[in-house]
Image: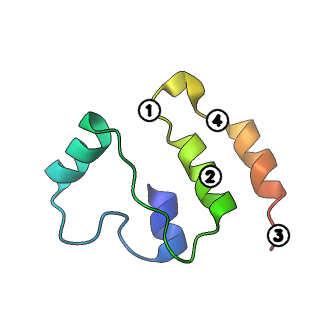
Amino acid sequence: MCILEGVSGKYPWGITMPDNAVVFHVLQRQIIPQRPVNCSKTAYHLVKKMCRFNPNERLGINEVVNVLSGFKR
């Protein structure tokens, strides 16, 4: 979720959610933070693919680099 923090400049779950609640949301409920307002849908889609709960379904680094190279600056 560091990438969401980098894009938004804010903690992905806010500053009021305790770490154990974050762990519960991610591991037990399999929920990731919502898309920050200043994060494009394309970038958030990439984040979701990188954070898939099944490790076999996650993008590899080469795929991530390919997608990122296609982003406009």
Residue ID at (50%, 42%): 51
Q: Position of residue 13 (x, y in %)?
A: 31, 63
Of helix, strand and loop, which one carries label 3? Answer: loop
Q: Nearer the viewer, mark 4 or mark 1?
A: 1
Which residue is labeled 2 in the image? 45
As measured in the structure, the alpha-carbon distance from the residue carrying label 3 to the one carrying label 4 is 20 Å
Question: On the rendered image, what quadrant is the C terminus found in?
Answer: bottom right
* Quadrant hosting residue 71: bottom right
Residue that numbered label 3 is attached to: 72
Hey, what amino acid is under mark 3?
A: Lys
Q: Which residue is mark 4?
A: 59
> The disc labelled 1 sits on which kind of residue?
Phe
Q: Earlier in the sequence, mark 3 or mark 1?
A: 1
First in sequence: mark 4 vs mark 2? 2
Q: Residue at x 57, y 51 (%)?
A: 47
**Whole-number angstrom distance, CA of label 3 to CA of label 1:** 28 Å
Whichever of callouts 1 and 2 sits on the residue coming sooner in the sequence is 2
- In the rendered image, which residue does mark 1 sit on? 53
